[in-house]
């Protein structure tokens, strides 16, 4: 018997500085906030939201993306260690992927050129977040 998983529920990324990471993810993606500790929250609310570790969880069409600010200040992501390789988000079309590239340009965020993966049926746009976490946006290449 196997686990009958049907989709991902959420991914949480460990980050060094929640303010820097929130600005990046807000500016790049503009996801809605699903969970965060409200300013001035009472102790009971803080206890109920302790699973956030001072971070935030965003909600978007694909599920949930969390940022957990517990990484040491001198740490940096590398996909060559055990764990995460990259996170890929999808957009509906190649035009949307081109718009994503232009958006990153407008924010001054370095990225690779859009790559057509041919027979794989997708094109990808690769870039990094402030913690060097490898991010990708993919779209059908036709």
Image: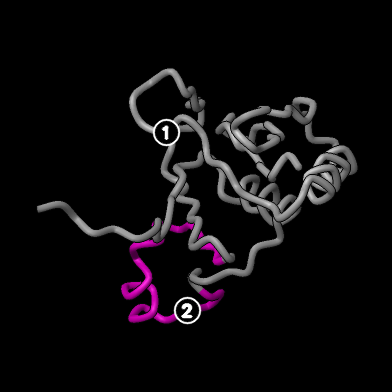
Q: Position of residue 138 (x, y in %)?
A: 66, 42
The image quadrant of residue 122 is top right
* Magenta span contains residue 17: no
Q: Relative to 36, is 56 above or below?
A: above
Q: Position of residue 89 (x, y in %)?
A: 60, 48
> What residue does disc 2 label?
41
Q: Position of residue 101 (x, y in %)?
A: 82, 40
Please rate how many residues cluster around mark 1, counting C-alpha atoms within 10 Å: few if below 14, some from 14 to 19, many from 20: few
Q: Is residue 40 magenta?
A: yes
Above-or-below relation of 122 to 54: above
Secondary structure under the numbered disc 2 in the rendered image: loop
Report whether 99 appears left or right of 5.
right
The image's colour scheme reads one colour
Magenta segment boundaries in residue numbering: 38-59
Q: Residue at x 68, y 28 (%)?
A: 118
> Which residue is at the far top?
80
In front of the other: 60 or 41: 60
Instruction: Work out whether mark 1 precedes mark 2 in sequence or the reverse, and give the earlier one.
Output: 2
- Horizontal placement of 42 versus 5: left or right? right
Q: If the image is split into quadrants, where does the C terminus sit?
A: top right
48 on left or right of 142:
left
Picture quadrant of residue 137:
top right
Please determine whether, in this image, residue 123 is positioned above or below residue 5: above
Q: Which residue is mark 1?
A: 84
Apparent side of residue 55 relative to residue 98 in the rendered image (left or right): left
Nearest the eye: 133 or 124 = 124
Looking at the rendered structure, the secondary structure element under dot 1 is loop
Q: Using the image as rendered, state which of residue 67 and residue 97 is in the foreground.
A: 97
Question: What residue is at 56 percent from the left and 74 percent from the top?
Answer: 39
Which of labels 1 and 2 is toward the front? Answer: 1
Gap between marks 1 and 2, in whole Å? 33 Å
Q: Residues within 10 Å of mark 2 (few under 14, many from 20)?
A: few
């Amino acid at each position: 018997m196997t686990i009958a998983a049907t989709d991902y529920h959420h991914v949480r990324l460990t980050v060094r500085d929640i303010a820097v990471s929130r600005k990046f993810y807000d500016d790049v993606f503009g996801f809605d906030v699903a969970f965060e500790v409200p300013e001035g929250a009472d102790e009971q609310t803080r206890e109920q939201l302790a699973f956030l570790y001072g971070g935030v969880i965003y909600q978007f069409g694909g599920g949930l993306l969390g940022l957990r600010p517990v990484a040491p200040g001198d740490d940096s992501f590398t996909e060559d260690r055990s764990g995460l390789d990259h996170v890929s988000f999808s957009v509906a079309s190649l035009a949307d992927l081109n718009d994503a590239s232009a958006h990153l340009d407008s924010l001054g965020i370095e990225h690779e050129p859009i790559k057509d993966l041919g027979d794989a049926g997708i094109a990808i746009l690769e870039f990094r977040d402030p913690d060097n976490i490898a991010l990708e946006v993919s779209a059908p290449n036709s």
